[in-house]
Image (tube, grey):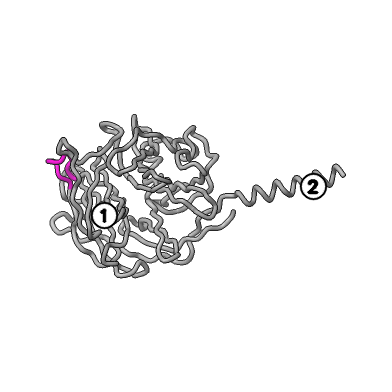
Protein backbone atom coordinates (compact mmCIF):
# COMPACT_ATOMS: atom_id res chain seq x y z
CA UNK A 1 0.00 0.00 0.00
CA UNK A 2 2.86 2.37 0.85
CA UNK A 3 4.49 1.69 -2.52
CA UNK A 4 1.20 2.35 -4.33
CA UNK A 5 0.65 5.64 -2.48
CA UNK A 6 4.22 6.71 -3.23
CA UNK A 7 3.74 5.95 -6.92
CA UNK A 8 0.45 7.89 -7.00
CA UNK A 9 2.06 10.88 -5.30
CA UNK A 10 5.00 10.76 -7.73
CA UNK A 11 2.69 10.64 -10.77
CA UNK A 12 0.59 13.50 -9.35
CA UNK A 13 3.70 15.59 -8.72
CA UNK A 14 5.02 14.99 -12.23
CA UNK A 15 1.61 15.88 -13.68
CA UNK A 16 1.54 19.14 -11.76
CA UNK A 17 5.08 19.95 -12.88
CA UNK A 18 4.18 19.25 -16.51
CA UNK A 19 1.02 21.35 -16.22
CA UNK A 20 3.02 24.27 -14.77
CA UNK A 21 5.97 23.91 -17.14
CA UNK A 22 6.76 27.06 -19.09
CA UNK A 23 6.44 26.55 -22.85
CA UNK A 24 9.28 27.93 -24.94
CA UNK A 25 9.09 30.09 -28.09
CA UNK A 26 10.02 28.55 -31.44
CA UNK A 27 10.27 30.10 -34.89
CA UNK A 28 7.53 28.54 -37.05
CA UNK A 29 8.60 28.55 -40.70
CA UNK A 30 10.76 30.88 -42.77
CA UNK A 31 11.68 34.48 -42.09
CA UNK A 32 10.78 37.22 -44.57
CA UNK A 33 12.52 40.59 -44.86
CA UNK A 34 10.35 43.66 -44.32
CA UNK A 35 12.95 46.45 -44.18
CA UNK A 36 16.39 46.89 -45.70
CA UNK A 37 19.29 49.31 -45.63
CA UNK A 38 17.61 52.70 -46.28
CA UNK A 39 18.69 55.60 -48.48
CA UNK A 40 19.23 58.49 -46.06
CA UNK A 41 20.34 60.96 -48.69
CA UNK A 42 23.16 63.15 -47.36
CA UNK A 43 23.19 61.14 -44.12
CA UNK A 44 23.87 57.77 -45.81
CA UNK A 45 27.08 55.87 -44.98
CA UNK A 46 28.31 52.37 -45.88
CA UNK A 47 28.46 51.47 -42.19
CA UNK A 48 24.90 52.45 -41.24
CA UNK A 49 22.68 49.80 -39.64
CA UNK A 50 19.02 49.60 -38.58
CA UNK A 51 18.98 48.60 -34.92
CA UNK A 52 16.26 49.11 -32.26
CA UNK A 53 12.81 49.28 -33.88
CA UNK A 54 9.04 49.12 -33.36
CA UNK A 55 6.26 47.59 -35.51
CA UNK A 56 2.54 48.44 -35.19
CA UNK A 57 -0.63 48.97 -37.28
CA UNK A 58 -1.57 52.60 -37.94
CA UNK A 59 -5.10 54.01 -37.84
CA UNK A 60 -5.62 53.36 -41.58
CA UNK A 61 -4.64 49.68 -41.20
CA UNK A 62 -1.20 49.98 -42.76
CA UNK A 63 1.78 48.54 -40.88
CA UNK A 64 4.52 50.83 -39.67
CA UNK A 65 8.17 50.30 -38.78
CA UNK A 66 10.28 52.96 -37.15
CA UNK A 67 13.90 51.99 -36.61
CA UNK A 68 16.89 53.74 -35.13
CA UNK A 69 19.59 53.85 -37.81
CA UNK A 70 23.07 54.06 -36.36
CA UNK A 71 26.43 55.07 -37.90
CA UNK A 72 24.84 57.70 -40.16
CA UNK A 73 26.15 61.14 -41.11
CA UNK A 74 23.53 63.02 -39.06
CA UNK A 75 26.14 64.12 -36.51
CA UNK A 76 26.35 63.68 -32.76
CA UNK A 77 25.73 60.06 -31.78
CA UNK A 78 24.90 59.33 -35.46
CA UNK A 79 21.40 57.89 -34.87
CA UNK A 80 18.02 58.91 -36.30
CA UNK A 81 14.60 57.32 -36.94
CA UNK A 82 13.56 55.99 -40.36
CA UNK A 83 10.10 54.72 -41.35
CA UNK A 84 8.75 51.92 -43.58
CA UNK A 85 5.13 51.07 -44.41
CA UNK A 86 3.46 47.82 -45.45
CA UNK A 87 -0.09 46.86 -46.42
CA UNK A 88 0.02 43.53 -44.52
CA UNK A 89 2.30 42.15 -41.86
CA UNK A 90 3.03 39.17 -44.13
CA UNK A 91 4.24 41.36 -47.02
CA UNK A 92 7.89 41.33 -48.01
CA UNK A 93 10.00 44.47 -48.49
CA UNK A 94 7.80 47.22 -47.10
CA UNK A 95 7.88 50.64 -48.75
CA UNK A 96 10.62 53.01 -47.49
CA UNK A 97 8.96 56.22 -46.30
CA UNK A 98 11.95 58.37 -45.37
CA UNK A 99 13.51 59.87 -42.26
CA UNK A 100 10.83 60.12 -39.58
CA UNK A 101 12.52 61.99 -36.73
CA UNK A 102 15.81 63.40 -35.52
CA UNK A 103 16.98 64.36 -32.06
CA UNK A 104 16.37 67.98 -31.05
CA UNK A 105 18.86 69.50 -28.61
CA UNK A 106 16.44 72.34 -27.81
CA UNK A 107 14.31 69.75 -25.98
CA UNK A 108 17.29 68.39 -24.06
CA UNK A 109 17.91 65.47 -26.42
CA UNK A 110 21.43 64.32 -27.24
CA UNK A 111 22.25 65.25 -30.86
CA UNK A 112 22.06 62.12 -33.01
CA UNK A 113 20.94 60.14 -29.98
CA UNK A 114 17.54 58.66 -30.90
CA UNK A 115 17.25 55.03 -29.77
CA UNK A 116 14.75 52.16 -30.01
CA UNK A 117 11.17 53.45 -30.28
CA UNK A 118 8.14 51.54 -28.97
CA UNK A 119 4.50 52.30 -29.82
CA UNK A 120 1.26 51.37 -28.06
CA UNK A 121 -2.29 52.55 -28.73
CA UNK A 122 -4.36 53.67 -25.74
CA UNK A 123 -7.88 54.76 -26.58
CA UNK A 124 -7.62 56.89 -29.70
CA UNK A 125 -4.02 57.94 -29.14
CA UNK A 126 -0.75 56.33 -30.18
CA UNK A 127 2.03 56.68 -27.63
CA UNK A 128 5.62 56.41 -28.83
CA UNK A 129 8.29 55.93 -26.19
CA UNK A 130 11.91 56.31 -27.29
CA UNK A 131 15.41 56.92 -25.97
CA UNK A 132 17.45 60.09 -26.49
CA UNK A 133 20.74 58.48 -25.31
CA UNK A 134 20.20 59.52 -21.68
CA UNK A 135 16.42 59.60 -21.11
CA UNK A 136 13.22 57.84 -22.01
CA UNK A 137 10.92 60.26 -23.83
CA UNK A 138 7.30 60.28 -25.01
CA UNK A 139 5.56 61.45 -28.18
CA UNK A 140 1.90 61.11 -29.18
CA UNK A 141 -0.12 60.97 -32.39
CA UNK A 142 -3.64 60.28 -33.63
CA UNK A 143 -2.92 58.53 -36.95
CA UNK A 144 -0.14 56.18 -35.85
CA UNK A 145 2.24 57.68 -38.40
CA UNK A 146 3.12 61.14 -37.09
CA UNK A 147 4.02 61.99 -33.50
CA UNK A 148 4.53 65.14 -31.43
CA UNK A 149 6.84 65.25 -28.44
CA UNK A 150 5.15 65.53 -25.05
CA UNK A 151 7.26 68.04 -23.15
CA UNK A 152 7.56 68.33 -19.39
CA UNK A 153 6.98 71.68 -17.62
CA UNK A 154 10.72 72.34 -17.96
CA UNK A 155 10.38 72.23 -21.75
CA UNK A 156 12.38 69.01 -22.04
CA UNK A 157 11.30 65.69 -23.55
CA UNK A 158 13.02 63.36 -21.07
CA UNK A 159 10.49 61.60 -18.83
CA UNK A 160 12.83 59.44 -16.73
CA UNK A 161 16.41 58.18 -16.62
CA UNK A 162 18.79 56.06 -14.54
CA UNK A 163 21.16 59.01 -14.44
CA UNK A 164 23.95 60.63 -16.47
CA UNK A 165 26.06 58.28 -18.59
CA UNK A 166 23.80 55.31 -17.79
CA UNK A 167 22.60 54.88 -21.38
CA UNK A 168 18.92 54.53 -20.42
CA UNK A 169 17.38 53.03 -23.57
CA UNK A 170 15.43 50.26 -25.36
CA UNK A 171 12.09 50.90 -23.68
CA UNK A 172 8.91 48.85 -24.20
CA UNK A 173 5.56 49.16 -22.40
CA UNK A 174 3.16 46.40 -21.31
CA UNK A 175 -0.09 46.80 -19.40
CA UNK A 176 -0.35 44.50 -16.37
CA UNK A 177 -3.65 44.87 -14.51
CA UNK A 178 -4.27 48.58 -14.00
CA UNK A 179 -0.63 49.55 -14.34
CA UNK A 180 1.58 50.16 -17.35
CA UNK A 181 5.04 48.59 -16.99
CA UNK A 182 7.91 50.29 -18.84
CA UNK A 183 10.82 47.88 -19.26
CA UNK A 184 14.20 49.21 -20.40
CA UNK A 185 17.92 48.72 -20.05
CA UNK A 186 20.64 50.90 -18.57
CA UNK A 187 24.33 50.49 -17.76
CA UNK A 188 24.79 52.14 -14.37
CA UNK A 189 28.50 51.96 -13.52
CA UNK A 190 28.95 49.93 -16.74
CA UNK A 191 26.77 47.10 -15.39
CA UNK A 192 23.98 46.19 -17.81
CA UNK A 193 20.63 45.50 -16.15
CA UNK A 194 16.97 45.48 -17.10
CA UNK A 195 14.67 47.83 -15.19
CA UNK A 196 10.96 48.49 -14.85
CA UNK A 197 8.84 51.48 -13.80
CA UNK A 198 5.06 51.51 -13.44
CA UNK A 199 2.42 54.13 -14.18
CA UNK A 200 -1.36 54.54 -14.24
CA UNK A 201 -1.36 57.34 -16.83
CA UNK A 202 1.85 56.90 -18.92
CA UNK A 203 3.13 60.27 -17.69
CA UNK A 204 3.85 59.83 -13.98
CA UNK A 205 6.20 56.92 -13.28
CA UNK A 206 7.30 55.07 -10.17
CA UNK A 207 10.88 54.71 -9.02
CA UNK A 208 12.82 52.12 -10.97
CA UNK A 209 13.24 48.49 -10.01
CA UNK A 210 15.72 45.94 -11.41
CA UNK A 211 13.97 42.96 -13.02
CA UNK A 212 16.93 41.09 -14.56
CA UNK A 213 20.67 41.21 -14.02
CA UNK A 214 23.75 39.03 -14.30
CA UNK A 215 23.60 35.26 -14.55
CA UNK A 216 25.06 33.19 -17.38
CA UNK A 217 24.92 36.09 -19.84
CA UNK A 218 27.13 38.27 -17.64
CA UNK A 219 26.82 41.82 -16.38
CA UNK A 220 28.63 43.87 -19.01
CA UNK A 221 27.11 47.08 -20.43
CA UNK A 222 25.52 45.13 -23.32
CA UNK A 223 24.37 42.07 -21.37
CA UNK A 224 20.75 43.22 -20.98
CA UNK A 225 19.94 44.89 -24.31
CA UNK A 226 16.52 45.36 -25.92
CA UNK A 227 14.33 43.87 -23.16
CA UNK A 228 10.92 42.78 -24.46
CA UNK A 229 8.28 41.29 -22.15
CA UNK A 230 5.33 39.23 -23.43
CA UNK A 231 2.46 37.72 -21.43
CA UNK A 232 1.56 34.17 -22.50
CA UNK A 233 -2.06 33.93 -21.42
CA UNK A 234 -2.43 30.16 -21.70
CA UNK A 235 0.41 29.40 -19.28
CA UNK A 236 0.18 32.64 -17.21
CA UNK A 237 3.92 33.18 -17.68
CA UNK A 238 5.60 36.48 -18.48
CA UNK A 239 8.52 36.11 -20.89
CA UNK A 240 11.55 38.39 -20.97
CA UNK A 241 13.64 38.43 -24.15
CA UNK A 242 17.08 39.84 -23.28
CA UNK A 243 19.65 40.43 -26.04
CA UNK A 244 23.43 40.24 -25.56
CA UNK A 245 24.75 40.23 -29.10
CA UNK A 246 23.48 41.69 -32.39
CA UNK A 247 25.55 39.54 -34.76
CA UNK A 248 28.22 36.84 -35.26
CA UNK A 249 25.82 35.23 -34.31
CA UNK A 250 22.96 37.20 -32.72
CA UNK A 251 22.03 36.06 -29.22
CA UNK A 252 18.96 36.58 -27.02
CA UNK A 253 18.25 34.67 -23.81
CA UNK A 254 14.64 33.98 -22.82
CA UNK A 255 13.28 33.96 -19.27
CA UNK A 256 9.84 32.88 -17.98
CA UNK A 257 8.37 34.06 -14.69
CA UNK A 258 4.93 34.30 -13.09
CA UNK A 259 6.09 37.63 -11.60
CA UNK A 260 6.51 40.46 -14.16
CA UNK A 261 8.80 42.26 -11.69
CA UNK A 262 11.37 39.47 -11.33
CA UNK A 263 13.17 37.53 -14.07
CA UNK A 264 16.30 36.82 -12.02
CA UNK A 265 17.70 39.80 -10.14
CA UNK A 266 20.24 37.96 -8.00
CA UNK A 267 22.54 36.93 -10.85
CA UNK A 268 20.88 33.53 -11.08
CA UNK A 269 19.39 31.60 -14.01
CA UNK A 270 16.36 30.03 -12.35
CA UNK A 271 13.94 31.67 -14.80
CA UNK A 272 16.00 31.01 -17.93
CA UNK A 273 14.16 28.76 -20.42
CA UNK A 274 16.20 29.05 -23.60
CA UNK A 275 18.29 30.94 -26.09
CA UNK A 276 17.35 32.24 -29.53
CA UNK A 277 19.70 33.26 -32.33
CA UNK A 278 17.98 36.60 -32.87
CA UNK A 279 18.68 40.21 -31.90
CA UNK A 280 16.32 42.91 -30.61
CA UNK A 281 13.19 40.73 -30.95
CA UNK A 282 9.68 42.15 -30.74
CA UNK A 283 6.51 40.03 -30.54
CA UNK A 284 3.37 41.06 -32.42
CA UNK A 285 -0.13 39.56 -32.16
CA UNK A 286 -2.40 39.92 -35.19
CA UNK A 287 -5.60 38.09 -36.08
CA UNK A 288 -4.87 35.18 -33.79
CA UNK A 289 -1.30 34.71 -35.00
CA UNK A 290 1.86 35.56 -33.06
CA UNK A 291 4.87 36.89 -34.93
CA UNK A 292 8.44 37.72 -34.01
CA UNK A 293 10.33 40.58 -35.64
CA UNK A 294 14.12 40.81 -35.29
CA UNK A 295 17.18 42.30 -36.93
CA UNK A 296 18.69 40.62 -39.97
CA UNK A 297 21.91 38.76 -39.03
CA UNK A 298 23.76 41.13 -41.38
CA UNK A 299 22.39 44.13 -39.45
CA UNK A 300 21.20 45.58 -42.75
CA UNK A 301 17.47 45.25 -42.18
CA UNK A 302 14.55 43.77 -40.25
CA UNK A 303 12.77 40.41 -40.66
CA UNK A 304 9.58 38.73 -39.42
CA UNK A 305 8.57 35.10 -38.83
CA UNK A 306 5.64 33.27 -37.27
CA UNK A 307 6.16 32.20 -33.67
CA UNK A 308 4.78 29.20 -31.82
CA UNK A 309 5.07 27.73 -28.32
CA UNK A 310 6.19 24.26 -27.36
CA UNK A 311 7.16 22.37 -24.22
CA UNK A 312 10.82 21.41 -23.93
Q: Is residue 68 left or right of residue 308?
A: left
**Dot 1 or dot 2, earlier in sequence:** 2
Residue 49: numbered disc: none
User: From the image, which quarter does the N terminus lie in?
Assistant: top right
Which is nearer the eye, 312 or 283? 283
Residue 13: percent from left, percent from top: 70, 46
Name the residue rendered at 27%, 54% in the picture. 126
Callout 1–callout 2 Cβ contact below 8 Å? no
- Judge whether residue 272 is colored magenta: no
Q: How crowded is mark 2: few (under 14 residues within 10 Å), some or many (20 or more)?
A: few
Which type of secondary structure does the marked residue at label 1 adopt? strand
Residue that extends furthest to the top in the rendered view of this protein: 189
Q: Residues within 10 Å of mark 1 (few under 14, many from 20)?
A: some
In the image, 49: left or right of 286?
left
Q: Main secondary structure of the magenta part?
A: loop
Task: Tell me which segment is drawn in magenta.
Answer: 103-112
Q: Is 161 placed left or right of 281 in the picture? A: left
Front tag of 1 and 2: 1
Position of residue 121 in the picture relative to residue 146 (left or right): right
Q: Residue at x 38, y 48 (%)?
A: 174
- Residue carrying label 2: 7
- What's the mark number on residue 125? 1
Callout 2: SS: helix
Amino acid sequence: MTAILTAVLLISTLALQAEDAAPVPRIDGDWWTVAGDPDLGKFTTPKQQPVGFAIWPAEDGTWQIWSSIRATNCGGRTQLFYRWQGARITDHDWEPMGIAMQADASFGETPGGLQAPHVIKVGKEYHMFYGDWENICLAKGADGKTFARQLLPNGKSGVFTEGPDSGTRDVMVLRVGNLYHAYYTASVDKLGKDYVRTSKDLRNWSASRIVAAGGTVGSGPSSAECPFVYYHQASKYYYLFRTQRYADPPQTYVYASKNPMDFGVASDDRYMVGIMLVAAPELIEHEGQLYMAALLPTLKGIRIAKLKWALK
